[in-house]
Amino acid sequence: MEPQPKLQPLISSKRIEAAVKKLASDISQDYRDKNPVLIGVLKGSFIFMADLVRLLDFPLEVDFVRLSSYGAGKKSSGKIKLAGGLSTEIKGRDVLVIEDIVDTGLTTNYLLDYLRQKKPASVKLCALTEKPSRRKIPVRIDYLGFTVPDKFIVGYGLDFDEGFRYLPEICFLED
Ligand code: IMP
């Protein structure tokens, strides 16, 4: 059997809860009358998206896309593919992308380009976390939860080889 990676706590569930509340309040102010389409990036954003959407008390729609860049392991393959597309017509709509993490920025940049080609009224980005130290391409994050150090993080939806998504807090893997 492979040795289990060691986990170190990084962001407690209390801090996550407070950050999600703050994001929901900022998003509510900007989108209350816009009937936006929130697009979650699977699989990593599923818990964050579910918690966030429950705190938004105005009309909105949700959709999901699935992108693949990482495969197994901790390093990006750099090749991004849309593995599951949108089912909502976003032309003329206000779109808010919900990401778990912006790391190199390649995945998010690819997705934002793809969405802009569909001529939405606006596209903004909400990310639970970002790792600015590893950015390869500039990405504007309009709503951000946490800046994290250059560590591989798991929990609250984020995985390592499909494991650890269920953790209620965010931890990092020890090298
Ligand atoms: P990027 O294209 O390098 O910005 O990577 C984006 C995707 O890689 C994220 O949506 C995650 O699925 C995955 N990823 C990047 N860093 C981490 C991490 O520290 N933990 C878990 N997944 C990560």
Image (cartoon, helix red, strand yellow):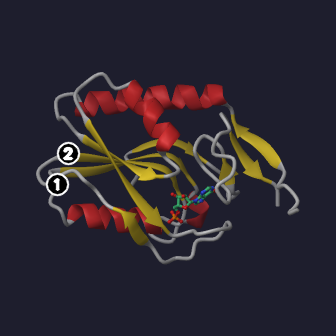
**Contact? badges 2 and 1 (CB < 8 Å):** yes
Q: Image point 45% across, 73% down: which residue?
A: 80
- At numbered mark 2, what does the secondary structure look like: helix, strand or loop? strand
Q: Is residue 163 above or below residue 17?
A: below
Pointer 2 residue Cβ closer than 8 Å to ligand 1: no
Q: Does residue 152 appear in the picture of this structure?
A: yes
Instruction: Specify whether 172 is left or right of 56.
Output: right
- The residue wearing badge 1 is 120
Q: Amino acid at mark 1?
A: Pro
Quadrant assignment for ligand 1: bottom right
Instruction: Tell me the quarter of the picture where residue 112 sits.
Output: bottom left
Q: Which mark is residue 164?
A: none
| Residue shown at 36% from the left, 31% from the top | 26
The structure residue drawn at horizontal position 56% and vertical position 42%, both measured from the top left corner, is: 146
Q: Nearer the viewer, residue 118 or 138?
A: 118
- Tell me where residue 51 appears, x and y as whole percent: 47, 30
Left or right side of 157 for 5: right
Q: Is residue 136 above or below residue 97?
A: below
Q: Nearer the viewer, residue 59 or 126?
A: 59
Residue 71: quadrant of the picture: bottom right
> Which residue is tagged 2?
94
Name the outermost residue toward the top. 57
Q: CA distance from mark 2 to mark 1?
A: 6 Å
> Looking at the picture, how far across and down is residue 118, in whole percent?
17, 62
